Amino acid sequence: MLSSLTSGLEKKGFFVHSFLNASDALKSLENDEPVVVVTDILMPDMDGIELMRRAKQILPDASFVVITAHGSLDSAIQALRLGAVDYLVKPFRLVELVFIIQKAMGQRRLIPLKKERGGLHERYQLKNLLSEDPRMIEIFNMVSKIAKTDVTVLIMGESGTGKEMMARSIHFNSKRKNNPFVSVNCAAIPETLLESELFGYEKGAFTGAMASKPGLFEVASGGTFFLDEVADIPMSLQVKLLRVLQERVVTHLGGIREIPIDIRLIAATSKNLKKEVDEGRFREDLFYRISVVPVTMLPLRERSVDVMLFAEYFIDYYTKHHRVNRRYTIDQQAALQLRSYHWPGNIRELGNLMERIVTLEEKEIVTTETLTRLMAMDKNRFSFEPEKSMGNTNLKDLSGAVEELEKKMIVDALQRSRGNKFKAARELELTRQSLQYKIKKYDIDTKDLL
């Protein structure tokens, strides 16, 4: 598996250092300084959680992604608590790992550092935010004011525009900067686990609850709680979240005691939340509760004046980071091509392209030919969405065909049970938790199956 992932990621343009055990990986960190560390949870000499703890002491700037099996999802949640960007449940496809790695890389890239190894407080200073667009400068000025308060903020924008970076900047410029910043991606945690992770639980609250466990709201008390992709919170949990924001108390699953919490909430979404309200997928009262101060991160295509600013920053950053002894210059036609491109992946995509230039290109003059060739690497990326019917499928590999068939069986079972997940899981001989994971994995809209 290690060999296969290494080979696959290298073909996608990544520089990969792989290790069969955690001890060797730790020894390499000071010299290699990876942007992203991908680790399994269960390993013989040291588990992935302990590897994360030690690696963060050596390389606090790195992002982490963990790989786990169904039986160790608790460990994956523990990794999220420690700051992992996301986790993958086996079995998974290479394109899914690539997607998460790109996301992890993006969380480090969107705000430049004044110092290569500067602390978090220095990194997230608002003065470090890059833009020459008057609208973004106005947003930065507004954020500098609200950072000093405890007002609830809703950050809206497409993927790759820097929503989490903005949230962290608000936190590290607030009076709560020395307290926890807890980030939860609501779309990344299965619905069956999200409630227990947010609110905690008492011993015996459900099968497998061998001891009481505090929720993430409690972990964040005194600091900032960041709810990423808040639009993906199930309706059943939206009522509980509304109560938390109104009363500032939580109650464990299976418990009766109200636990007071002191948090500053920042939420983010890449969806049109007002449209979600209008279509009945998000509570209107919760929408107004979390959008006291709305902040919109503009897509890169609407701030073309910033494209070259970011391009030059990323080239400078990656030549130093990868110790490349070349001085790149983007010629006039290439610069025009960069400004006119629509950038669906926003700043994250631009950063990826500049890193490819630094790591793959030996000519120091970047031309339109260079850009066209390296941008072509993105054409087949993220193409893992299954086709609507097996009859029209163009899937070339066996695993893709199996996944398409599995999705069709799940949809058919849900239709027969009229959306009843318990009945569908029993028919498919799956646990409800496994079914919920697969529904999320294949992006099946159960509302259409009722």
Image (cartoon, rainbow, N blue to C red):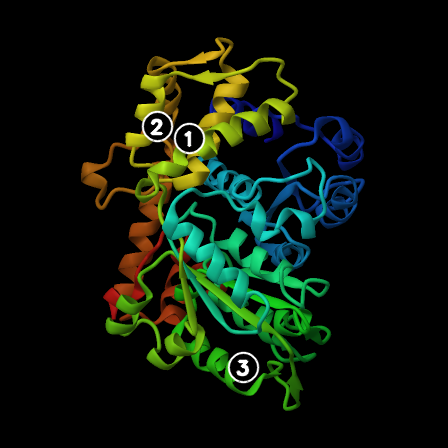
Q: Please identify, in this view, whether the residue under mark 1 or under mark 2 is nearer the observer.
A: 1
Secondary-structure class at tag 1: helix
**Which quadrant would residue 374 be assigned to in this image?**
top left
The amino acid on which the numbered mark 2 sits, given as a three-letter code, is Leu
Q: Which residue is mark 3?
A: 244
Instruction: Say whether disc 1 or disc 3 marks the residue closer to the N-terminus.
Output: 3
Query: Looking at the picture, how far across and down is residue 36, in whole percent?
Result: 61, 37
Against 75, is 225 above or below? Answer: below
User: Disc 2 or 3, which lies upstream in sequence?
Assistant: 3
Mark 1, other Cα within 10 Å: few <14 / some 14–19 / many ≥20: some
User: Quarter of the image containing the N terminus?
Assistant: top right
Which amino acid type corresponds to the residue marked 1 in the rendered image? Met
Q: Residue at x 42, y 56 (%)?
A: 138
Q: Earlier in the sequence, mark 1 or mark 2?
A: 1
Does residue 15 appear anywhere in the picture? yes
In the rendered image, which quarter is residue 341 located in?
A: top left
What kind of residue is marked 3?
A: Val
- Between disc 1 and disc 3, the foreground one is 1
- Residue denoted by label 2: 338
Give the Cα distance between marks 1 and 2: 8 Å
Disc 1/disc 3 C-alpha distance (Å): 43 Å
Q: Residues within 10 Å of mark 3 (few under 14, many from 20)?
A: some
